[in-house]
Image: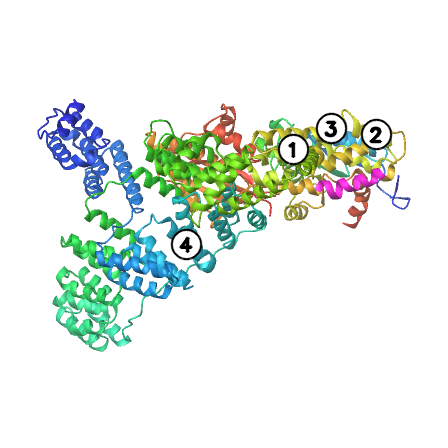
């Protein structure tokens, strides 16, 4: 039936006749997913309204919900909102209320995503286009001043024309007028949030020149740039620097981790890593507020105004008092508005007094409107404020015009407003624009995914885009998925997505950029396709495959082609030049055959030497591994604990008594098995665990902490196997164990990962759980959040903590079944003197849970998973009673991070 | 028994010390190396420690009691406690003893890795010394021998 109706609609048959309300409902559901729903939106809505009229009273609400969903699906969100608002007033049942809330949330999210859409370009005359072209040439010829003058004139004529603004920014950059350039770039990004290059340059300027006050804006700009262009991996370094400047060491570490995962490395990253690890958190300064100009009335005028407002004052007297107040202080906006309420006229003296005061006129207009003034009464005030160049008046006038059904006039104002330097109501302006315009067909999932990337939640972005890359999926979705993987530093997955989207040009371009950072031999065919299309980065990507396969001459050819064609800002340029130089040196060195033979022998020896060194030096020291792979920490902490307790405390601590108790000391160290072997076994287990995480550890002999300890223990054991002698050396070893090895082991425990949670981070995690639960149809209640201080730092790796939190929250939501839920984060000290960080999620359910019952649960999900993960991170579960309306809270306590 | 410059410390010889630990490693080690000088008793949990207190001159406490039956674990007041208290049980036993008026000097064998926490505990549970794992038995013996002097000074 549905198919038939859809076909009828598609065929333009005006009168398809579904019979029952359910058929209408199914039709609405089906059509809200149809790819061509936009084309038949009005027709479909007409049909659905007929269904609404025919539906039985008990089913109207269900059908109306589906209709609202259809309206949402075709971008008519204002109508959908109104419909939902009306439905909310009809006292829906719990399930219906939940569905209404879900749909409202979905509309909210989609509208937020639409904020990422660029504003429309104004109409540009051919002459203006020609002027811009001429100015571009001037800039190219080094005449930045002239180019700037031309761009200024064009921007004045068409404030929302991006090309003119872009040229203006470039000219200002050439002239070194960085502050003005930043201002221009801000406007450009307001007009076109998809301009990655503008975000990047703005972020760079603010990061380098802006100091602490601009650090947040700089980071925001860099986040926008990275969300649009994940290949700009160097921006992670800049973000790390910003985070360090603001005392956000954990964020810096995360940015550096992303840099590394994206294929980046280098001395600067290592330096920042060291700084980040050493840094403690510092609070950032509050941004300075801009206060509006003051139009303070005199004390006398204020007294008269108060008298006029007294309940006992008759209207005529009030009028006289207000007139007197305005005679004294004509710019007294409140008095003028009050007088307007009594006389329906705005005093001319006030208008005159505010002639040059844009904010004053705007305030007067607002107050007069509140006092019942008509649009016609306030319109001249707003016109004057606009004429004075006060940007907020544009927004106010747009709202007024929208109310007067003057859509084009309102849109003109909104466009000018979006091009203003610092609009205070840009989001509201976007919402107003969305209401005024014919709904546009945005690729909403892609926009929503970008929104999630801006929130630094790639996993949520993936979830928004649907199932991961698979053959046959639309190219746009595959590219969007690839970008998210690229953003997360999951380069092989990104390559796989882009390959599936080939031969789409954008996919090939992205593939080339990724493969330039991380060689992708499997993608050679697609890269050759890209090179044939003139994508310069593909040559560098192919060169990297050739280099990896030791095909030097092919690599050189590709590098030359890349260097000839790559744009100046291409991220592969520096590496390509270095590789070329290296290749040329190698080929020169191989010129003479005699020399070649010798060189060959020397190289052979060197290779052997290298292999020898690699055998011993391959892998990372434990300290460095813990920095790179925080998930290794629990195992490392356990190994260190065992060595300190079993070996150092209970066995090696007797070494100092070898002179008096040689036989006992020997037994203590050598049986049941030598202490050195016990330490070696601990280290080998740790090495195995690290390898499983893709991070090989150094061989024991070259490991700087465990290696020397094992050597000292082995030496002590060798001495003790002899019947006598070596007492002094044993005392030396005893001393080293106390003064060198023990502190080194203790220092490893200070390398625990740290996750700082503030309200923002917590909200992000809550949203993730909410999306998942709502998708599964589970009840949801927005939890209250009680955070002790501005943030709480946990000595737990972020993903582990997030998993613990998600399971606690899911459990509480399920228990509460729509009732109250609370999230508490804080610090406390226990009876053993430990400082603990505590994460609790409470609910209002009367059902109880005990530690014993959690203990009995099978591992793998829910509270059992919380239990196991909490223990893994050296914490313990707690269950506490909560004050009403909550009943209990389940949570996890962890030792606070070491100072 | 001689110490340092060959002087015999008065009061230390034959002193009875109560070792509170979940295994027997401390007791065996102390017995083997210091048994000629001191007498060591072992208590595996709080209740046993209370029973063995008469005649004891000092307490030696392990920190971690994970091998102890959870039913025998106590909190700082001596009341039964959850199993997660096992890893700090030594401190809780000492607190519970102090809350019952036991003022014997105590050595807690623990790697706290937190100077501030250690200082707080030493102040709260005095007379208390915290002995890290790296400390050799020779130095521990010195501490034990010095206990009577410290008690006299108090």
Given residues A303 and B139, the one toward you in this image is B139
Going from N to C along the chain, the mark reached first, 4 or 3, is 4
Depicted A165 relative to depicted A512: above or below: below
Asked whether the residues under marks 2 and 1 belong to the same chain, the reply is: yes
- Helix, strand or loop status at disc 1: helix
Q: CA distance from mark 4 to mark 3?
A: 57 Å
Numbered tag placed on residue A677 in the rendering: 3
- In the image, which is nearer the foreground, mark 1 or mark 3? 3
Residue identified by numbered label 4:
A201
Find the magenta span and give its range: A729-742
Instruction: Please identify the quadrant where the N terminus of chain A is shown.
Output: top left
In the picture shown, does residue A214 fall above or below B22? below
As drawn, the label of residue A664 is: 2
Q: Judge by depth and name the residue closer to the eye, A781 or A448.
A: A448
Mark 1 Cα shell of 10 Å, populated few (<14), some (14-19), many (≥20): some
Q: Is residue A768 visible?
A: no
Give the number of the mark in front: 2 or 4: 4
Chain holding disc 3: A
Q: CA distance from mark 2 to mark 3?
A: 19 Å
Judged from the image, the secondary structure of the residue bearing numbered disc 4 is: helix
Q: Chain of mark 2?
A: A
Point out the tag, 2 or 1, that comes first from the N-terminus. 1
Other residues around mark 4 within 10 Å, as few (<14) / some (14–19) / many (≥20): many
Gap in Å between the C-alphas at discs 2 and 4? 71 Å
Q: Are marks 4 and 1 in contact (CB under 8 Å)?
A: no
> Is residue A678 highlighted in magenta?
no
Q: Earlier in the sequence, mark 1 or mark 3?
A: 1
Residue A99 sits in quarter = top left
Relative horizontal placement of residue B115, taking residue A287 as reference (left or right) = right
Decide which of tag 2 and tag 4 comes sooner along the chain: 4
Q: Which residue corresponds to the image point at 27% horizontal and 31% vertical from the top-left? A: A95
């Amino acid at each position: 039936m549905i198919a038939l109706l859809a076909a009828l609609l598609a065929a333009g048959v005006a009168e398809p006749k579904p019979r029952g309300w359910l058929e209408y409902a199914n039709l609405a559901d089906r059509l809200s997913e149809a790819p061509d729903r936009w084309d038949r939106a009005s027709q479909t809505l007409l049909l659905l309204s007929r269904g609404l009229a025919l539906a039985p009273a008990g089913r109207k609400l269900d059908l109306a919900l589906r209709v609202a969903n259809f309206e949402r699906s075709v971008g008519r969100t204002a109508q959908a909102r109104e419909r939902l608002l009306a439905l909310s007033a009809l006292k829906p049942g719990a399930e219906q209320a939940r569905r209404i809330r879900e749909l409202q949330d979905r509309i909210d999210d989609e509208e937020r995503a639409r904020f990422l859409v660029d504003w429309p370009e104004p109409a540009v005359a051919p002459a203006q286009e020609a002027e811009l072209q001429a100015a571009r040439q001037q800039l190219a010829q080094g005449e930045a001043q002239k180019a700037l003058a031309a761009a200024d004139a064009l921007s004045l004529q068409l404030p929302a024309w991006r090309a003119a603004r872009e040229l203006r920014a470039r000219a200002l950059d050439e002239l070194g007028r960085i502050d003005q350039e930043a201002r221009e770039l801000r406007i450009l990004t307001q007009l076109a949030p998809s301009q990655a290059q503008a975000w990047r340059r703005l972020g760079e300027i603010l990061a380098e020149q802006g100091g602490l006050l601009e650090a947040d804006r700089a980071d925001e700009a860099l986040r926008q740039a990275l969300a649009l262009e994940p290949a700009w991996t160097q921006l992670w370094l800049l973000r790390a620097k910003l985070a360090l400047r603001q005392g956000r060491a954990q964020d810096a570490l995360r940015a550096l981790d992303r840099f590394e995962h994206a294929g980046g490395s280098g001395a600067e990253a290592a330096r920042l890593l060291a700084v980040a690890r050493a840094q403690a958190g510092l609070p950032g300064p509050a941004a300075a507020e801009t206060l509006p100009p003051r139009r303070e009335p005199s004390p006398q005028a204020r007294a008269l105004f108060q008298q006029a407002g007294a309940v006992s004052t008759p209207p005529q007297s009030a009028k006289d008092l207000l007139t007197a107040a305005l005679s004294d202080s004509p710019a007294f906006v409140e008095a003028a508005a009050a007088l307007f309420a009594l006389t329906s006229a705005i005093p001319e003296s006030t208008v005159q007094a505010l002639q040059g005061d844009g904010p004053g006129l705007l305030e007067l207009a607002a107050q007069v409107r509140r006092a019942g003034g008509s649009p016609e009464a306030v319109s001249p005030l707003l016109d004057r404020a606009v004429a004075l160049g006060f940007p907020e008046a544009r927004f106010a006038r747009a709202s007024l015009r929208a109310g007067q059904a003057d859509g084009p006039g309102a849109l003109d104002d909104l466009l000018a407003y979006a091009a203003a330097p610092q609009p205070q109501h840009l989001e509201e302006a976007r919402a107003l624009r969305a209401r005024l315009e014919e709904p546009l067909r945005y690729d909403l999932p892609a926009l929503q995914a970008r929104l999630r990337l801006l929130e630094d939640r790639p996993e949520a972005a993936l979830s928004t885009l649907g199932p991961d890359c698979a053959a046959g999926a639309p190219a746009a979705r595959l590219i969007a998925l690839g970008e998210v993987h690229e953003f997360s530093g999951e380069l092989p997955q990104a390559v796989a997505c882009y390959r599936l989207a080939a031969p789409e040009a954008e996919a090939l371009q992205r593939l080339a950029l990724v493969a330039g950072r991380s060689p992708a031999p499997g993608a050679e065919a697609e890269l050759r396709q890209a090179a044939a299309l003139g994508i310069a980065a593909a040559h560098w990507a192919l060169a990297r495959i050739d280099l990896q396969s030791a095909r030097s001459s092919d690599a050189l050819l590709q590098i030359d082609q890349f260097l000839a064609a790559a744009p100046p800002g291409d991220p592969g340029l520096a590496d390509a030049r270095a590789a070329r130089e290296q290749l040329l040196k190698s080929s020169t060195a191989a010129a003479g055959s005699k020399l070649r033979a010798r060189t060959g022998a020397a190289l052979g020896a060197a290779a052997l030497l290298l292999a020898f060194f690699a055998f011993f030096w391959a892998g990372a020291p434990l300290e460095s591994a813990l920095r790179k792979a925080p998930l290794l920490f629990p195992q490392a902490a356990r190994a260190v604990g065992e060595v300190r307790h079993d070996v150092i405390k209970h066995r090696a601590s007797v070494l100092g008594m070898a002179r008096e108790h040689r036989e006992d000391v020997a037994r203590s160290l050598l049986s049941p098995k030598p202490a050195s072997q016990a330490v070696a076994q601990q280290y080998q287990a740790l090495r195995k665990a690290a390898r499983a995480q893709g991070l090989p550890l150094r061989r024991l002999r070259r490991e700087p902490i465990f290696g020397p300890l094992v050597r000292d223990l082995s030496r002590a054991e060798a001495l003790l196997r002899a019947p006598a002698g070596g007492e002094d050396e044993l005392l030396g070893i005893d001393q080293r164990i106390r003064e060198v090895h023990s502190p080194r082991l203790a220092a490893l425990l200070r390398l625990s990962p740290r996750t700082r949670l503030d309200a923002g981070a917590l909200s992000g995690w809550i949203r993730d759980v909410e999306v998942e639960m709502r998708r599964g149809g589970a009840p949801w209640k927005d939890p209250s959040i009680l955070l002790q201080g501005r943030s709480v730092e946990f000595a737990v790796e972020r993903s582990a903590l997030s998993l613990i939190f998600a399971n606690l929250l899911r459990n509480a939501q399920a228990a509460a079944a729509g009732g109250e839920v609370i999230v508490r984060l804080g610090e406390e000290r226990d009876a053993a003197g430990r400082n603990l960080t505590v994460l609790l999620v409470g609910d209002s359910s009367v059902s109880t849970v005990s530690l014993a019952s959690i203990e009995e649960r099978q591992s793998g999900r829910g509270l059992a998973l919380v239990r196991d993960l909490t223990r893994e991170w050296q914490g313990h579960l707690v269950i506490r009673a909560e004050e009403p309306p909550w009943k209990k809270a389940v949570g996890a306590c962890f030792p606070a991070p070491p100072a | 028994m001689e110490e340092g410059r060959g002087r015999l410390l008065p009061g230390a010889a034959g002193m009875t010390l109560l070792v509170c630990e979940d295994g027997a490693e401390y007791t065996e080690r102390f017995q083997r190396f210091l048994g000629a000088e001191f007498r060591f008793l072992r208590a595996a949990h709080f209740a046993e420690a209370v029973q063995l207190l008469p005649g004891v001159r000092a307490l030696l406490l392990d920190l971690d009691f994970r091998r102890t039956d959870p039913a025998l674990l106590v909190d700082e007041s001596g009341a039964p406690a959850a199993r997660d208290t096992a890893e700090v049980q030594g401190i809780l036993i000492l607190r519970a003893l102090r809350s019952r008026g036991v003022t014997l000097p105590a050595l807690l064998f623990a790697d706290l890795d937190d100077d501030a926490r250690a200082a707080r505990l030493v102040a709260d549970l005095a007379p208390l010394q915290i002995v890290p794992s790296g400390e050799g038995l020779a130095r521990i013996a010195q501490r034990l021998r010095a206990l009577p002097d410290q008690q006299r000074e108090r």
